[in-house]
Amino acid sequence: MWERQHGRQLLLSATAFGASLVLLLASGYQLLFLQENSDWQDYTGAAIGMAVVSSILLLIITPEFLTLKGYVSTLDELKDIDSLSELKRRRSEGDEAAKVLGAGHAEAWNEFLQSKGLKKMK
């Protein structure tokens, strides 16, 4: 199942990270400011549960999201290099990042390498 998602893992992890963060912030807001309000008192238990679940999800999702984001940053950094010798030296980093990210990132990396003359055109 996950093999079919290759190339979309950055989107999926970013979405899961963002949703978990929103849940954590919403439950934190409820616990900090709304639990004393009589209209919102009944939601305190749910807010505690949401905070626990979203914290666990963030502990699981955040490292993978940051790793994938780091690969994107690596590709962006390599594309800004003007020195051809420096680019040749660090090409393996870009190849690894493009392979892990897949899909559009790999295509964009290959096109970039072709534009620099480091890869033969097909």
Image (cartoon, rainbow, N blue to C red):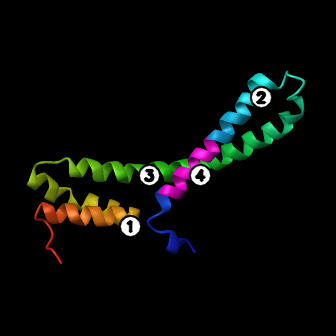
What amino acid is at disc 3?
Thr
Residue 56 spot, x, y in % from top left: 67, 47
Residue appearing at x 16%, y 55% in the figure: 87
Judge left or right: residue 105 versus residue 116: right
Amino acid at dot 1:
Ala
Residue at image position (76%, 30%) is 30
Dot 4 or dot 1, earlier in sequence: 4
Residue beneath label 1, please?
103
| Quarter location, residue 102 | bottom left
**Viewed as shown, does residue 43 lie left or right of 54?**
right
User: Dot 2: what SS?
Assistant: helix
- Magenta segment's dominant SS is helix
Earlier sequence position, callout 3 versus callout 2: 2
Structural distance between the alpha carbons of marks 3 and 1: 17 Å
Counting from the top left corner in percent of width and height, residue 116 is at 12, 60
N-terminal of the pair, mark 2 or mark 1, is 2
Q: Which residues are magenta?
A: 11-21
Q: Secondary structure at mark 1?
A: helix
Give the spatial CA distance, label 3 vs label 2.
31 Å
